[in-house]
Amino acid sequence: MEQQKAAAKSLDDWYRIAKKARWRNLAEVRTVYPHADLVGKCIVFNIAGNKYRLIAKIAFHRQVLYIKHIFTHKQYDQGGWKDGCRS
C-alpha cells in the first residue's frame, strides 16, 4: 500500500509537469528528466526513484503525449512492451 502511494504521488508530479511542458525534442525532455531514454519511438521515464517506468510516445510537432504503459521495474525488464515502440 505504501509503495502504491509513493507511485501515485510520483506519477501525479510527472503528470503535472508533462501537462504544462512544451517539449520540442528529447533534449528538452532531458532538461527536466535527465534520465529519460529513447527506446524505439518511445520515451521511458523513471518514476518513484526508478521503481516504476512510464512508457510514452510524444508527438512533439502536435504537442500530444500518449502514455502507453506504466510498469514496475520488474515488469519493464520483461521487455514485451518494446514491440509497441517500433512504429
Image (cartoon, rainbow, N blue to C red):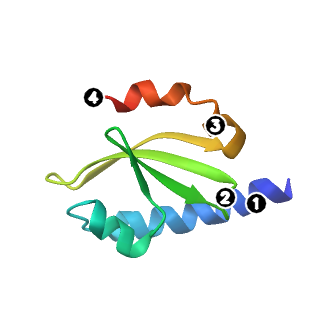
Distance from disc 3 to disc 1, alpha carbons, whole Å, reads: 22 Å
Distance from disc 4 to disc 2, alpha carbons, whole Å, reads: 29 Å
Is the residue marked by circle 1 packed among few (<14), some (14-19), or many (20+) residues within 10 Å? few
**Residue in the image at 28% along x and 69% along y:** 28
| Of 86 and 8, the residue lying toward us | 86
Please say if the residues under marks 1 and 4 sit with CB atoms less than 8 Å apart.
no
Q: Residue 49 appears in which quarter of the rendering?
A: bottom right
State the mark number for residue 77: 3
**Residue in the image at 25% along x and 65% along y:** 23
The residue indicated by pointer 4 is: 87
| Amino acid type, residue under disc 3 in the picture | Asp
| Amino acid type, residue under disc 1 in the picture | Lys
| Of 49 and 68, the residue lying toward us | 49
State the mark number for residue 5: 1
Placement of 41 over or under 84, stated as above or below: below
| Amino acid type, residue under disc 2 in the picture | Ala
Please say if the residues under marks 2 and 1 sit with CB atoms less than 8 Å apart.
yes
| Amino acid type, residue under disc 4 in the picture | Ser
* In front: label 3 or label 1: 3
| Of 9 and 32, the residue lying toward us | 32
Please say if the residues under marks 4 and 2 sit with CB atoms less than 8 Å apart.
no
* In front: label 3 or label 4: 3
